Amino acid sequence: MTPYSSLADDFYVNVNLATEMELPSQRETILQYFERVQKRFPTMRKFYCRDKRDYVLEEDKDQGRYRWVAVETKRLCSGQVNPSSLESVLDQHRLVLDLAPAFLSVSPLDCEALDVLFGFDFAYRGNHNALLAEALGVGPALERFGEVPGGRVINYEPSLTISLDEDCRVQVRVSTETRTNAFQVRTGEFSEEQLSVYVTARQYGSLDPDTSYVDAMDRLAQLAREVVDSCVVEQILRPLARTIALK
């Protein structure tokens, strides 16, 4: 189990490589790429095409823990939900990126953006926005606004992005995503939906000549993990879990 597995109902680590040029879509190229991925992870047996151009290879989702890889028009994606360890999911991402130059003709020049996302989902039946405001607070500048008589919170998704270099090419974002709408708040009829917290480390632009996609991903993953450990676990994830438990 990862050190984050007990912090939310679902935990996942995704990698997304957005390219400037379109990725190959020829039958032989796509199949050869996924066959190499499957050779390393034989339980990835479900292959399908969605939206006529996006190809996906994934494991069975029934157990609640699964790997997936996708080749889209201008994006290569890899993810694992509820991984057994951080190293296992990073090994998957390393393989996906290591194979990309040879099988998908992805050059380090062809990078629009590379990001590593640590995601945490909480299942909650109720007003996600009000829950976030209660668990995290809204900051001194907005406290009085939240106390307006008869007011109900219908939109609150705090996020913050910081740059870590002078060129603003390396950025880290902490964000939230709610899935409650005004109709549900008005009627009081809520279904159990996922409230998400994301930590995304991203690098924009082409890679340096002596840097591989695997090297860049490893640095971003380390950066994302440091932010989760120092800025998110105690400040966001645990307060959310405690507030949900009290409802």
Image (cartoon, rainbow, N blue to C red):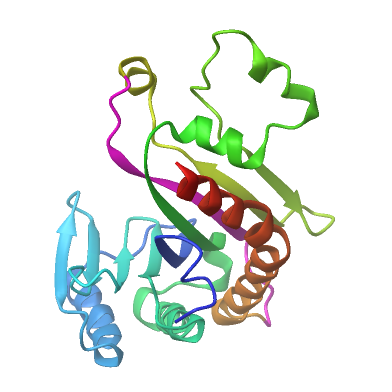
Asked where in the image residue 30 lies, by quadrant, the reply is: bottom left
Judge whether 120 appears above or below 130 on screen.
below
Q: Position of residue 207 (x, y in %)?
A: 64, 70
- Residue at image point 73% right, 23% down: 143
Q: Position of residue 189 (x, y in %)?
A: 28, 25
Residue that protrudes farthest toward the bottom in the picture: 39
- Residue at image point 39% right, 56% down: 74
Q: Is residue 194 magenta?
A: yes
Q: Position of residue 63 (x, y in %)?
A: 21, 72
Q: Position of residue 242 (x, y in %)?
A: 54, 52
- Residue at image point 69% right, 47% down: 161
As drawn, is 10 to the left or to the right of 118? left
Judge whether 164 appears above or below 123 on screen.
below
Q: Nearer the viewer, residue 131 or 29?
A: 131
Q: Is residue 89 magenta?
A: no
As drawn, is 117 to the left or to the right of 46? right
